[in-house]
Amino acid sequence: MRNAEATPTSRLAAVLFDREEAVDDVMRAFIEGLRARGAKVAGLVQEPGAEERDLRVRDLSTGECLPIMQDLGAEATGCAVDPAAIAVAARMLDRARGEKPDLLVVNRFGRLESEGAGMIAEIGAAVAEGEAVLIAVPLRYADAWNAFADGLDAQIRPEISELDRWWRAAGRQSASA
């Protein structure tokens, strides 16, 4: 993993994490801190739903929550992410991009994105337009992420101090652009 220092001016940050790490809690705390300092943050964060295997995304601008899992039955072992729900989430992310936030947050680069689907087009468009983008990337998808990002990202651990360091560097780069 490359450290945020390796690409200090990158406006794209991948928070690489392992399953047991509380990446969503860290990202939400970071977002709250940015907002408290006056930054406009839009996009999606991932949250647990009412049941153990239930997940949803929350739109940071509207507060709207969208369940993203489908019920595959009690014996299912495969990925239960609902591609139709992710298509709706992609539209939500595109709407968030239209707000021209200081930071666009993407809840995950996951299985669908690693296969070239999901929210990959919206992520790519944001990066191509030079937007500051923060995205959570499970370590199991790091190879697919690296192929997508092609070294244009800062890769950081799910720690507030690393997120803050990246944001300060990304902000300096933005001011000079």
Image: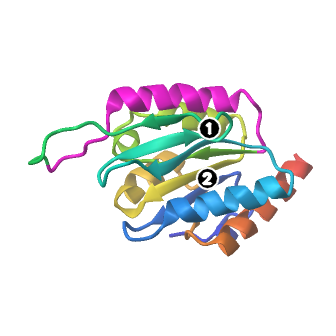
Q: Which residue is mark 2?
A: 152
Residue at figure coordinates x 32%, y 34% from the top left: 82
Q: Position of residue 92 (x, y in %)?
A: 57, 29
Task: Give the number of the mark in front: 2 or 1.
Answer: 1
> Mark 2 is on which residue type?
Leu
Q: Quadrant location of residue 72?
A: top left
Q: Is residue 110 above or below residue 143?
A: above
Residues packed near mark 2 inside 10 Å, few (<14), some (14 to 19) or many (20 plus): some
Residue at figure coordinates x 27%, y 36% from the top left: 70
Q: Is residue 124 above or below residue 29?
A: above
Q: Is residue 126 above or below residue 152?
A: above
Is 98 magenta? The answer is yes
The answer to whether any part of residue 68 appears in the image is yes
Is 36 magenta? The answer is no
Q: Quadrant location of residue 177?
A: top right
Q: Which residue is mark 1?
A: 63
Residue at figure coordinates x 12%, y 47% from the top left: 74
Q: Position of residue 59 (x, y in %)?
A: 59, 38
Label 2 sits on a secondary structure element that is: loop
How many labels, in total? 2
Label 2, label 1: how far apart the Cα atoms are: 31 Å
Look at the image and give the residue range highlighted in magenta: 77-102
Q: Position of residue 116 (x, y in %)?
A: 38, 35
